Amino acid sequence: MNEHLFAERERLLALITEIRNSGAVAPANVWISPNFQNKGGKTYEYYKLTSDNPEVKHQGLGKMGSEKYRDWFARIQRRNAIYELEQQLSMLQALLDRQAAIVLELPQSKRESS
């Protein structure tokens, strides 16, 4: 088995742990959407947290740059980064499993000559 692949797996796991430890992570099916309101002939843009997840309530986040907006934006970025790393980890694990299966299938005489 390739020690470089194992090292890469450990690196990905460490990155995921680092991201999780850096702050709260947004749950799945939660996103920020704009909300336009007209007042006194002017249009104001606000943002709200929208969710298909029943565990998370819709909530107003205020204007872009507000503390709530930045908090949820960072949570969503962390979630998306973890998702991407988990996809890479899954592909890497499939490769490791495939290599392990090939090694098991090699005849004994070929393994000894390697």
Image: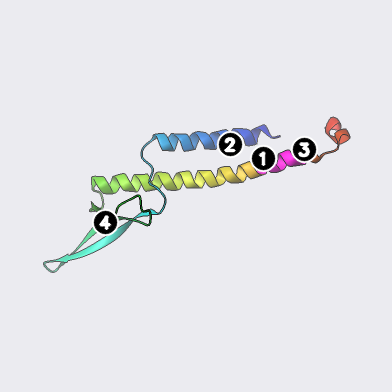
Q: Main SS of the magenta segment?
A: helix
Upstream in sequence: badge 4 or badge 2: 2
Quarter in which the N terminus is drawn: top right
Name the residue type under label 4: Tyr
Label 2 SS: helix
Residue furthest to the front: 54
Kindly report the distance in space between the C-alpha atoms of the residues bearing marks 4 and 2: 38 Å
Q: CA distance from mark 3 to mark 4?
A: 54 Å
Q: Is residue 72 found left or right of 112 in the rendered image?
A: left
The Cα atoms of the two marked residues, 1 and 3, are separated by 11 Å
Relative to residue 114, is residue 76 drawn left or right?
left
Please give the residue where the numbered disc 3 appears in the rendered image: 103
Q: Are marks 4 and 2 in contact (CB under 8 Å)?
A: no
The image quadrant where one finds the C terminus is top right
Callout 1–callout 2 Cβ contact below 8 Å: yes
Q: Residues within 10 Å of mark 1 (few under 14, many from 20)?
A: some
Q: Amino acid at mark 2?
A: Arg
Please provide the residue range marked out in magenta: 95-102
Residue 96 found in image quarter: top right
Q: Disc 3 residue type?
A: Val
Q: Indicate which disc, 3 or 4, sits on the residue closer to the N terminus.
A: 4
Residue on which the image places disc 2:
9
Q: Which disc number belongs to residue 47?
A: 4
Residue at 26 percent of width and 46 percent of height: 68
- For marks 1 and 2 on the same chain, the one whose residue lies earlier in the sequence: 2
Residue 48 is situated, as x and y percent measured from the top left of the image, at 27, 56
What is the secondary structure assignment of the residue under circle 1?
A: helix
- Discs 1, 4 touching: Cβ within 8 Å: no
Q: Callout 3: few (<14), some (14-19), or many (20+) C-alpha neighbours within 10 Å? A: few
> Which mark identifies residue 96?
1
